[in-house]
Image (cartoon, rainbow, N blue to C red):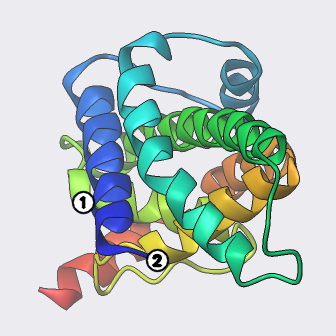
Amino acid sequence: MTSALVRAAGNLLDVLVDRVLRTDERVATAAEGKLRIAAEDGMEEVADRVQRFVAIATPTVRMLARGARFTRAPWVLVASTTVSLTTTVRAGVREVRVLGALVAHRLEQASGEPADPALVKKLAVELYLAPRQEPYVKGLDLPLTRLLRKWLLRGLFGRNTRRAAENALDAVEQLDLDRVLETRRSAY
């Protein structure tokens, strides 16, 4: 992965979480989150950032394809891969945004204070990538490479990410936020 691609994904997450925290955009339940993921709402505002991300990611996918058995990829394949990648990244961005809104709501309810943006990003991404695992919150570094790999591979093969996002929404509801907040306090 190129560092420009990782930076682009980090910037995209920053914009999404900042938008969620600046507005009253909250998701109170996993069921509400699933409905929001199913609907195409408000993505025009981040479409240009998604397209910039895809513009950076497409050469990476082409470079990876060069190392494969078939070295000459027809332009139709590259174009369809780009369309698939764009669709997957858009869906992924929407899913992470909805997850962040639910995480922010739950953190605010648990602590009675505004949610920490770094913790919202960390929990949203960790649960998006591995909803069955306990998220590691002692450090707030984001697993951007894993996120990129998921989006690129699913985009490359045209796989849907909705089921994984729905599992992540369910995991947010099951998360013991008192323990998460205590772990964060002890990490300082």
Instruction: Count numbered badges in the picture.
Output: 2
Q: Secondary structure at mark 2?
A: loop
Q: Residue at x 61, y 39 (%)?
A: 95
Point out the tag, 1 or 2, that comes first from the N-terminus.
Answer: 2
Q: Amino acid at mark 2?
A: Met
Label 1 and label 2: CA atoms lie apart by 23 Å
Q: What is the residue that sits farthest to the left in this orientation?
A: 188
Give the number of the mark in front: 1 or 2: 2
Q: Secondary structure at mark 1?
A: helix
Q: Residues within 10 Å of mark 1 (few under 14, many from 20)?
A: some
Q: Position of residue 85 (x, y in %)?
A: 68, 44
On the picture, is 160 further left or further right than 41?
right
Which quadrant of the figure has residue 112?
A: top left
**Considering depth in this image, is 46 or 21 the residue closer to the camera?**
46
Can you say whether 46 is above or below 122 in the image?
above
Q: Residue at x 51, y 38 (%)?
A: 102
Residue 120 in view here: no
Which quadrant of the figure has residue 24?
A: top left
Q: Residue at x 48, y 36 (%)?
A: 97
Please tell me the numbered disc located at residue 53: none
Q: Amino acid at mark 1?
A: Ala
Q: Residue at x 21, y 88 (%)?
A: 186
Q: Label 1, on which residue?
A: 118
**Considering depth in this image, is 89 or 105 the residue closer to the camera?**
89
**Considering depth in this image, is 33 or 40 the residue closer to the camera?**
40
Q: Residues within 10 Å of mark 2 (few under 14, many from 20)?
A: few
Q: Position of residue 135 (x, y in %)?
A: 53, 77
Can you say whether 23 is above or below 34 in the image?
above
Which quadrant of the figure has residue 38?
A: top right
Q: Position of residue 34 (x, y in %)?
A: 75, 29
Can you say whether 125 is above or below 95 in the image?
below
Q: Label 2, on which residue?
A: 1
